[in-house]
Image (cartoon, helix red, strand yellow):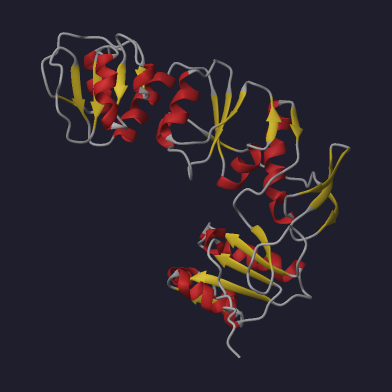
Amino acid sequence: MRLENTLALTHGELINTPFVSNFNNIVFNAKAVRRGDLFIAFDESSIEDAVFNGAYGVLFDKPTQITDSEIAWIKVQNLEDALTRLLRFQLINKEIAVYSCDEIILKLALQVVTEPNFLVLHGDIKTVFKELSAVEDGTTILFSPALTSADLFTNSKELPKNKAQSINIIEQTLFETSFIYDDVFYERQLVSPFFMPYLEQLLHLFKILKINFRLKKFTPIDHFEAVFTNKNFEIKDFGTSDKVLIFEKNTSLIENEIVFLQKQATWAKIIYIIPFTCKQSLDKTTLEHENLFFYKNRNEIKNILQANSFHFVLIVGVDKSILEKPLVRQTQLTLDF
């Protein structure tokens, strides 16, 4: 890529007057730099190594000392934004089909084995750049705007609508599902029935695009994640206790998950612990639940858990890392009588 094109695409400022005018490749790892490459300085401490290895240019967004005036030193406002614009330019002439989806569908897609010409895009900008730089014509790309910038693509499509129910649920618990799809039986998959509509949309896309796939055993996707605990809130094996903490980081799913729990666990005592910042956005029906609690910090979550009895608790806005330290202080054993 020519230097002037790089400056135009990244909205960069050329700090010096270099002798170089072209770059061969874009590289993030200083050890992988070869003569002629443009080094993206996410790790500014590696700039010296990149220059030593032959970089013809350094793209940076933090105060940096120029150590070689013969190469190009390009300052940008934000490296991720600059890299997004460079990648968008590279993709313009690629014959690819891009579909956008929500975060849950994408995380389910990451657990499905598909053909090489179907790419599920996930990861930081460096990972995304490496994957898309090598993408071949004819590839179908699935991404979530909640996880990856939509600015990467000049054109993307929404998933085709699935009008008819295609998954036949045979048996279910709150956190496991046995189902039939296209005459294939999938037994005790570790995916909640709550996610079945999302899975149906994904499988419908495969059918429309005639993409071969294979479902493997699902693992938790960081949504509606069940953690079984004892009375001291110590984590136990899946299914081995009757006290379950359900973690959901995505606050937009609060109301749908409350409805799901109310419908599927009518026998259980359920409480809901919601960030105080979400109170104004909840509908009137949700706010009328008597077992609805609001918190402003993590300590308040712990206090609510200790003060209430329950079978299930939906905890929104945090993950299970709150259990890394014991919630209940253990009694000290002494020799005193």
Q: Can residue 76 be seen in this view?
A: yes
Residue 181 placed where, x, y %?
83, 40
The residue positioned 76% from the left and 36% from the top of the image is 215
Asked where in the image residue 241 lies, by quadrant, the reply is: bottom right
For the N terminus, the image quarter is top left
Q: Is residue 41 above or below residue 2?
A: below
Q: How many marks?
A: 0
Q: Can residue 160 be seen in this view?
A: no
The residue positioned 74% from the left and 55% from the top of the image is 193
Asked where in the image residue 39 lies, by quadrant, the reply is: top left
Q: Is residue 315 above or below residue 197?
A: below
For the C terminus, the image quarter is bottom right
Most extreme residue toward the left is 17
**Which residue is more in the foreground, 204 or 42?**
42
Residue 64 placed where, x, y %?
17, 31
The residue positioned 80% from the left and 60% from the top of the image is 173
**Which residue is more in the foreground, 130 or 330?**
330
Asked where in the image residue 29 lies, by quadrant, the reply is: top left
Residue 279 placed where, x, y %?
47, 73
The residue positioned 71% from the left and 37% from the top of the image is 204
Q: Is residue 64 above or below residue 235?
A: above
**Which residue is more in the foreground, 26 or 158?**
26
Most extreme residue toward the bottom is 337
Q: Is residue 172 above or below residue 296?
A: above
Describe residue 233's horizontal placement relative to residue 321 as left or right.
right
Residue 237 placed where, x, y %?
73, 58
Describe residue 196's horizontal placement relative to residue 32 as left or right.
right
Describe residue 310's horizontal placement relative to residue 31 as left or right.
right
